[in-house]
Amino acid sequence: MESFPRGDSRSSHQLQKGVKMSEYIEQVLEDVRRKNVGQTEFIQAVEEVLTTLAPVIDLHPEYQENAILERLVEPERIIMFSVPWIDDKGIIRVNRGYRVQFNSAIGPYKGGLRFDPSVNLSVLKFLGFEQIFKNSLTTLPLGGGKGGSDFNPKQCPHTPGRRCSNHEVMRFCQSFMTELQRHVGQNTDVPAGDINVGAREIGYLFGQYKRIMNNWSGVLTGKAVSFGGSLIRPEATGFGCVYFAENMLARVKQDFQGKRCVVSGSGNVASYAAKKLMSLGAKVLTLSDRSGAIYAEDGLTPEAWLAINRLKEVERGELSDIAATLQGVKFFPKANVWQIADKVDCAFPCSRQNELDAPDAEYLLKHGCKLVAEGANMPSTPSAVDIFVKSGILYAPGKAANAGGVATSGLEMSQNSERMYWTAETVDSKLREIMAAIHDNAYAAAEQYGHKGNYVMGANIAGFIKVADAMVAQGV
C-alpha cells in the first residue's frame, strides 16, 4: 500500500464544493472555464478532481512551481479527422473521428473508443481526463487517452429503425483505422472498446491496422481470445466494480448476501456486474437501456440474465424486445432504474455520464441505500455526489470502481508482450488483487489527508500524486 503525507481536517463537502481551495486551484479552474466554453462535461470532470486536491497542493509547492495543474488539464495532443465510408446502398457517408491523447507521464496513452451520436470533443476530453487518474490507480504503467466517433452502429443511415449491417460497420471501422493508425502503437497509444465498440468492432479495427502496418502487435485491447485477447476482459469492468464494492463492505464487516441491488445499463459493465452480484448472493432488481428499465422484485434469475446477455451480445437488441418473455419482470418504457424499487441496499450506475441526479440520490437514500459503486464514467451529477458524500454512505467514484476494465486491458498488453495466454483463473485473481489495491490506496490516501472513508478524495489524491510526481521528475 502506498503512503501519503497527512493533510488537514477540512470536510470533504467544503473541498468538493470549492470552499477554502488554494488560490492556485481557483485560478486554474477559472482558466479552464474560460478556454473551454460550452464543454460542460469536461469542465465538470476537471472541477470534480481539482476541488479535492487542496490538501495536496498545500503540502507540495513544487506542483505549482512546475505548473502541474495547468499542464494536466491540457491534452498533450488532440487528433480530429474525417471518416468517409460507403453504406450498403453505395452512398458515401462521412463521420467525424477523434483521439484525445491526454497524458503520457506514467505510460502510453490508454483508453477506449466510443461510437455514439453523443460523442463530441467535450465528452472525449472528460473521459480522457478521468482516464489519467483511473489508469494511475490501477498501479500499472498506463497513461490516459480516449477516442471515438459520432458514428451510430445502432441506426443505419438509409433505413430508419434498422441497425448498420456487419459490412457497414466493417467499412466504417476500416476507414476510421486508416487514419488512426498514424497515431497509435503498442508503446505510444493503445485504444480499447467502449460504448458500441465491442469484439466485432475491435476485430475490424485490428485487422485494418495489421493490413496497413504489416505488423502484428498489441495495439488494441479487447481483442477476441483467438488473436491475442485476454480471458475475463469482457467481464472485467463489471466484475472489478463489484470487487471494489466487496472491499468496501468488508471494511464494515458486511457482504453481498441478500443485498437488494439496482443496476443501470445492460451492456458489458452492467451485465457482468449483475452476474457477479448474483454469484455473491445479492438480488439484482433492475437493468436498463434506451428503451426503458426492467424490474424484478425478487431479483433476476440466471435464466433471465442469460436471455438478456444473449439479447445484447448476439442479437444486439433492446430490453423492450424481450421484457414480456421474462418471468417475474416488469418493464418501464423510457424509465431509469433509480426510483422503481421500494427497498434498495446497493446501487450500481453502469450506463453513462450524469444518469443519476439529486432526486435519484435522495430517493435511493430514503429507501435504504447504503452503498453506491459507479461502473460507468461520472454517472452521478455533482449534486448527487454531494448528497452521497454528505450522507456518509459507502460511495465509490467511477475512476476507482470501474478501473477493472483498463486494468485487465493492461494485463492483455502484458500477455501480448510475453506471447502468452493466462488462464481465466489467473486473470481473475490478478483483477481481484488490483481492485483490492485500488481500494486500499484510495482509502489510505483519504485517511492520511484527514478524510477517512471519503473514496472521492482518496481516489483523486492517490491517482493525482503518482502522475504529478512523474511530471515533475520528467521536466517541462
Image (tube, rainbow, N blue to C red):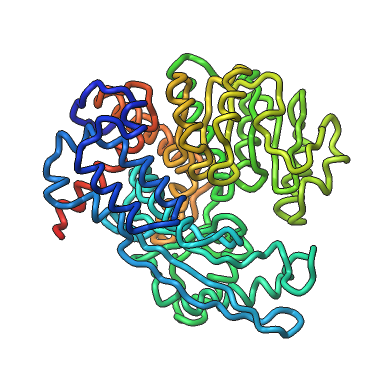
Q: Quadrant of residue 103?
A: bottom left
At which x and y percent is residue 407? 43, 47
At which x and y percent is residue 70? 24, 53
Please say whether residue 420 is visible from this viewpoint.
no
Pick out the residue farthest to the top.
253
Front residue of this view, candidates 430 and 292: 292
User: Residue at point 54% right, 33% down?
Assistant: 242
Location of the N terminus (image quadrant): top left
202 left or right of 337 in image: left
At which x and y percent is residue 435? 43, 36
Q: Is residue 38 above or below residue 17?
A: below
Front residue of this view, candidates 228 and 83: 83
Count of picture labels: 0
Q: Is residue 89 above or below residue 185?
A: below
342 left or right of 31 in image: right
Please say whether residue 81 is visible from this viewpoint.
yes
Q: Is residue 214 above or below residue 107?
A: below
User: Residue at point 49% right, 57% down?
Assistant: 112
